[in-house]
Image: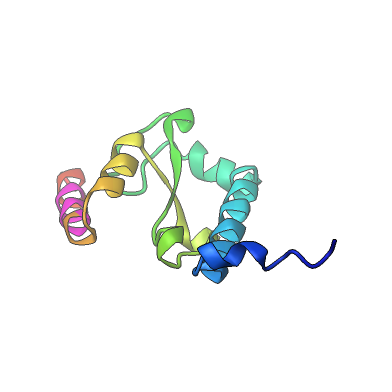
């Protein structure tokens, strides 16, 4: 019974991408446990809006989402406050860029 590996792929044309996504989710989970991530949270600051945020309020965010080919690497993962994280989810990439420009201006004051 070792020959069933491809049986379920008929209903799933993006099997390759899906495996990649799963791998990156797994890597994200490991990264979240790392000392490096603890240091990111310990800064107590949201990467996007720069607002002081309690370490336990910071969430892990992928700059390029995993679903769009982003990887779970230190270069693509930032600590974001919940506001930014949820905004990023529902805004279009263009709207998100505008939001970033606005917030970076605000935090320069
Ligand atoms: Zn933020």
Q: How many marks?
A: 0
Position of 80 relative to 92 (above/below) = above
Image location of residue 71, percent across then percent down: 51, 64
Q: Residue drawn 50% across and 68% down?
A: 14
- Identify the magenta region: 96-103
Figure colour scheme: rainbow
Image quarter of residue 84: top left
Image location of residue 42, percent across then percent down: 51, 37
Position of 29 relative to 81 (above/below) = below
Image location of residue 108, percent across then percent down: 19, 48
Q: Nearer the viewer, residue 8 or 77?
A: 8
Q: Nearer the viewer, residue 74 or 107?
A: 74
Q: Residue drawn 43% across and 60% down?
A: 67
Q: Main secondary structure of the magenta part?
A: helix
Quarter of the image containing the N terminus? bottom right
Q: Would you say 88 lies left or right of 62 here?
A: left
Q: Would you say 75 lies left or right of 83 here?
A: right
The residue most toward the right is 1
Q: Residue drawn 15% across and 45% down?
A: 106
Quarter of the image containing the C terminus? top left
Asked whether 25 falls inside the magenta stretch, the response is no
Position of 97 relative to 108 (above/below) = below
Image location of residue 95, percent across then percent down: 16, 55
């Amino acid at each position: 019974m070792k020959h069933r590996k491809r049986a379920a792929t008929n209903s799933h044309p993006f099997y390759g991408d899906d495996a990649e996504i799963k791998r990156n989710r797994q890597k994200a989970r490991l990264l979240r446990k790392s000392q490096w991530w603890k240091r990111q949270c310990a800064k107590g600051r949201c990467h996007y809006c720069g607002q002081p945020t309690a370490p336990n309020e910071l969430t892990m965010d992928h700059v390029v989402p995993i679903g769009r080919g982003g990887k779970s690497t230190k270069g693509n993962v930032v600590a974001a406050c919940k506001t930014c994280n949820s905004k990023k989810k529902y805004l279009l990439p263009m709207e998100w860029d505008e939001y970033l420009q606005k917030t970076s201006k605000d935090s320069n004051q």
